[in-house]
Structure formats: structure tokens, C-alpha cells
Image (spheres, rainbow, N blue to C red):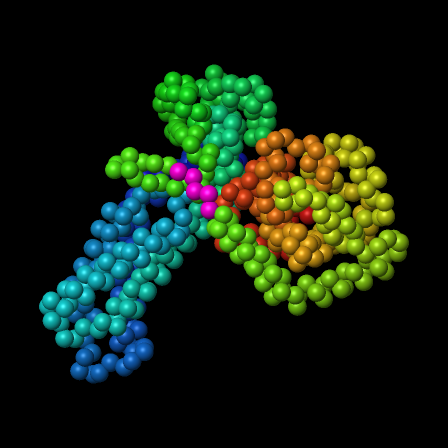
């Protein structure tokens, strides 16, 4: 039985009458039997729908009257099919609670189970020589079962993601012990995948230069000796240990301490700073070998795919953005501020290459001369300044910035290959001059118009968190991740979330 914990209890308890912060963790409970029961119901429903499609609707080809049979004839097969599905899914790990398992993995287990069950039913019907048995109905059954079971998992994922990321329900408060490279890798995933339900509350490290320093909104809570006090004061649910294996005794002390205070512990071996996607696991007569594959061809192929996606989407969206482009250009020309339509600024691209990034001009002429003064006055982070109520912005500029239309000329950079639709936002040279060594990793790919940090909080995300999200994007790039970020960007732009 899984019990969820709330990390924003005051907000949620106001929305659920009769629920207090003390008993909220008992509200959302998913019994272990629930998913198997739902699968049984869905499997039976799949048989009903398949029977209806074959005998009532007679899809694809008609059924002879002599071959029409009642549904009750199929009941033994329904029971065998459903039972075999449950056995397959139980042995295949579908009912194990694995946080972070992808939908594709679950769908694969579902499809394999359905395939095995269909083969079993066909074999039984063949051996029994059943004459009034529709093989075509089994095709309907397989498709419908996969759709229903996968749909249940998808709906469940959406519900969990909503409760965790939007309502704070089911979120585990996580303390990271060790804030080196491995700790930062863990933090990147937790920040990028809020749907997994982890909320980092701070980190501990025996190195004062790390343990006492905040990393974005993740607080440095001192040395590891503070572990027990921090667990109590921060109401920690999970401790993730990311220390190197050379500190084995220290790790075991931490695990023992967590056991004593009844807090779950997870230990991340430092080999995983390499990222699982970069590892190749081989078996040498029972001995696991972990290797790193360097595949230039895959790297080149990924770049070509990303480039093709950029050009395809820009071309398909041209009927929308080209007219808007012309209207905005005309409005800026007529705004009376006396400046040019476009504004170009030197930016740092992939691997430190310089290029001129184009935007619609949204500020008064010579606005750059006032930038440094405003950054100081508003006490902004000079590595990623976001100036509120900027007096340099023109009336038209305020409108196009709130709607993100000032960035439309970025598409020129996309077409020329200097930028991509998705990627880390390109910094200015003076911002890069202030970077620490680990910050430079965000320059290891083509910069983008939008990115993971923009859809994860936009202007409200501190600089260090932005870099962690950018590095996560670089390490986990896929065409599906790009499409997901683009789809998440659209409502944020329309709702003007985080833009000013």
C-alpha cells in the first residue's frame, strides 16, 4: 500500500474540506489489488467490444447466420485469457511500483502479455476444433485490450503527475547527501521530472565550499554530521546518498542513521555520473561489464534529425508566423521611438561560437547602456538577469514581450542553423565570463528558442537550476523530448506565464 505525503499541506488542506495537514498523507492510498482488478475489468470489456465489433457491427467482413454464436460461448476463453494476462503481468513486473518507469516500458509489457494470451487462445481453439470461433475477433480483441490497458496506465500517469506537480500531493521531500557531480545529476532529474514526485529540500556535504552554499533554490544545509537534525527539521521522507564509493564507511553510517529515524534511503553509485544512456552493459560469463560507447554516427544522426525537425516545423508554421512577423514589424516602425525594427545582440552558441541573435526591438534606442545599472539596482544575478518593470521597454515592446512575439526573429537564426527550436537559451559573452566550470556544460549543444527551463518556471527559475535543467536536456535529448517541450511552450506563451 502506497501512502502519499504532502509537501504543500497548507495549500491543499484549504482546498479539501475536512482534511488537515496531519491526516493528509492518509488520503490518497492505492491498494495493491487495484490495478489487477482494473485489468480484469478492462480485459472483459475488451471481449465485449470485440464481440460487438465482429458479430453486431460485422466490421471488415460479414458473419454468416449459421456462424453467429452467443457471447456465452466465449466465456471459458474470457477466463483463460484474463488469467493468462494477470500471470504475464505479475511475472513481467507490471504491478511492481517502479517510480520513473516509462510509459513505453509499460506498454511493451502490456503488448507482450496480450500477444501471449492471444496465442494461447488460438492454440486452445485449434486443438478443440471449435467451428463457431472467429479468428478475426481475436485481432479486434488484441487491439482493443492494448488500447484499454495502455489508456488506463496513461490516465493514471496524468493523474499522478497532476497531483504531484500541481497540487503537491504524493510528493516526497528529498535530502541529497553529497552535492558533487553525481548529486547534481540526481538533482537535474528531480527538477526536470516534477511528475515523478520528488521535491529536493536541501543538500549536505562535508566540503564547506559545497555544503554551505545554496544551489539555486536547493539549500546548503551544512555537513553530513547534521543529518539527523536536518531530517527532523525539514520533515525529510527520502535521503539520497551520492557519495563516492571510497567513502563506504561513511555511507553505511548514513544508512544506519536513516534506519534509526525510519526514513527511506537510496544510494546512487558514483558510476552513474556517466548517465545510463551512455552506458553499455555486457555480460562476461556472469560478470557484468559497464562500458561507454562512443558512436559518432549516432551523434551525427541525432543532429540531422534535430535539424530536419526544426526546418519542418518552421516551414509548416510559416502561414501563422509570417503574417504575425509582418504586423509586429509594422507596429514597431510606427511606434515613434525612433529605433530600428530589429535588435541584434552578440550571443554565445554551441561550444563557445559567437553569433548575432535577432529579436524585435522592444526597448528604446541605446537601452544596453542602462542594463548594468538596472541589474545592480534590482540586485539581479548578472549571469541571468530578469529585470522587472524595465523602464527601457516601449509601449509596443511591453506587448510583444508579454506575448513572446519579440523572439519571432529567432526563427531567422533557426533557419540559418545558429539556433534550434529547442535548446538552452544562448547567453551573452559577459554572462559566460561569470560562469563556473560546470556551468559551461550548457554550451555543449545548439542553443534554442525555447527550452526545458522555460517550461519549468521560466523567469522564476534561478540560474543554477536553469543550468541543471539545460544539462539534463543535453544528456537526455530525443525527438520526443523536443516535441514535448514545444507542446508545453505553446500554452505558456498563450497564457503569458513568466514573461515580462
| In this picture, residue 360 sits left or right of residue 420 | right
Outermost residue on the top side: it is 225
Residue 275 on the magenta span: no
Q: Quadrant of residue 108?
A: bottom left
Outermost residue on the left side: it is 128
**Where residue 361 sits: x, y (%)?**
79, 52
Outermost residue on the bottom side: it is 65
State whether residue 41 is above or below residue 253.
Answer: below
Q: Which region of the structure is painted magenta?
A: 291-295
Q: Residue at x 25, y 68 (%)?
A: 138
| In this picture, residue 13 sits left or right of residue 56 | right
Q: Residue at x 68, y 63 (%)?
A: 321
Q: Residue at x 14, y 68 (%)?
A: 126
Main secondary structure type of the part rendered in magenta: loop
**Where residue 414 sits: x, y (%)?**
65, 55
| In this picture, residue 199 sits left or right of residue 418 | left
Q: Quadrant of residue 61?
A: bottom left
- Residue 365 or 203: which is nearer the viewer? 365
Amino acid at each position: 500500500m502506497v501512502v502519499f505525503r504532502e509537501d504543500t499541506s497548507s495549500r491543499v488542506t484549504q482546498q479539501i474540506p475536512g482534511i488537515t495537514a496531519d491526516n493528509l498523507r492518509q488520503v490518497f492510498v492505492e491498494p495493491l489489488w487495484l490495478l489487477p482488478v482494473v485489468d480484469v475489468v478492462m480485459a472483459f470489456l475488451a471481449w465485449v467490444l470485440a464481440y460487438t465489433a465482429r458479430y453486431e457491427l460485422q466490421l471488415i467482413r460479414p458473419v454468416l447466420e449459421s456462424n453467429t454464436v452467443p457471447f456465452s460461448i466465449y466465456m471459458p476463453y474470457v477466463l483463460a485469457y484474463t488469467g493468462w494476462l494477470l500471470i504475464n503481468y505479475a511475472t513481467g513486473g507490471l504491478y511492481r511500483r517502479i517510480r520513473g518507469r516509462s510509459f513505453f516500458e509499460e506498454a511493451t509489457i502490456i503488448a507482450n502479455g496480450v500477444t501471449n494470451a492471444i496465442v494461447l487462445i488460438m492454440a486452445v481453439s485449434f486443438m478443440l476444433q471449435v467451428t463457431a470461433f472467429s479468428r478475426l475477433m481475436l485481432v479486434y480483441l488484441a487491439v482493443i485490450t492494448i488500447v484499454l490497458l495502455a489508456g488506463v496506465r496513461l490516465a493514471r500517469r496524468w493523474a499522478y503527475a497532476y497531483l504531484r506537480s500541481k497540487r503537491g500531493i504524493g510528493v516526497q521531500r528529498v535530502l541529497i547527501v553529497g552535492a558533487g557531480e553525481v548529486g547534481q545529476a540526481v538533482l537535474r532529474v528531480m527538477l526536470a521530472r516534477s511528475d515523478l514526485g520528488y521535491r529536493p529540500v536541501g543538500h549536505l556535504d562535508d566540503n564547506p565550499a559545497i555544503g554551505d552554499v545554496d544551489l539555486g533554490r536547493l539549500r546548503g544545509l551544512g555537513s553530513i554530521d547534521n543529518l539527523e537534525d536536518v531530517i527532523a527539521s525539514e520533515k525529510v521522507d527520502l535521503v539520497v546518498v551520492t557519495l563516492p564509493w571510497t567513502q563506504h564507511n561513511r555511507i553505511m553510517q548514513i544508512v544506519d542513521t536513516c534506519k534509526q529515524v525510519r526514513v527511506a534511503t537510496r544510494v546512487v553509485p558514483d558510476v552513474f555520473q556517466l548517465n545510463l544512456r551512455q552506458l553499455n552493459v555486457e555480460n562476461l560469463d556472469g560478470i557484468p561489464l559497464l562500458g561507454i560507447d562512443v558512436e559518432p554516427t549516432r551523434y551525427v544522426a541525432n543532429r540531422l534529425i534535430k535539424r530536419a525537425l526544426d526546418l519542418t516545423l518552421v516551414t509548416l508554421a510559416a502561414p501563422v508566423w509570417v503574417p504575425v512577423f509582418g504586423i509586429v514589424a509594422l507596429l514597431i516602425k510606427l511606434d515613434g521611438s525612433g529605433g530600428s525594427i530589429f535588435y541584434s545582440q552578440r550571443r554565445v552558441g554551441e561550444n563557445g561560437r559567437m553569433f548575432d541573435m535577432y529579436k524585435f526591438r522592444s526597448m528604446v534606442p541605446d537601452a544596453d547602456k542602462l542594463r548594468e545599472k538596472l541589474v545592480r539596482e534590482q540586485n539581479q544575478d548578472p549571469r541571468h538577469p530578469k529585470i522587472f518593470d524595465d523602464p527601457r521597454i516601449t509601449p509596443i515592446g511591453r506587448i510583444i514581450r508579454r506575448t513572446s512575439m519579440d523572439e519571432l526573429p529567432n526563427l531567422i537564426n533557426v533557419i540559418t542553423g545558429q539556433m534550434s527550436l529547442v535548446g538552452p537559451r544562448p547567453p551573452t559573452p559577459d554572462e559566460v565570463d561569470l560562469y563556473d566550470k560546470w556551468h559551461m556544460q550548457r554550451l555543449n549543444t545548439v542553443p534554442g528558442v525555447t527550452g526545458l527551463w522555460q517550461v519549468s518556471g521560466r523567469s522564476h527559475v534561478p540560474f543554477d537550476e536553469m543550468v541543471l535543467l539545460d544539462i539534463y536536456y543535453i544528456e537526455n535529448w530525443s525527438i520526443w523530448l523536443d516535441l514535448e517541450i514545444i507542446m508545453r511552450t505553446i500554452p505558456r506563451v498563450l497564457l503569458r506565464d513568466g514573461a515580462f
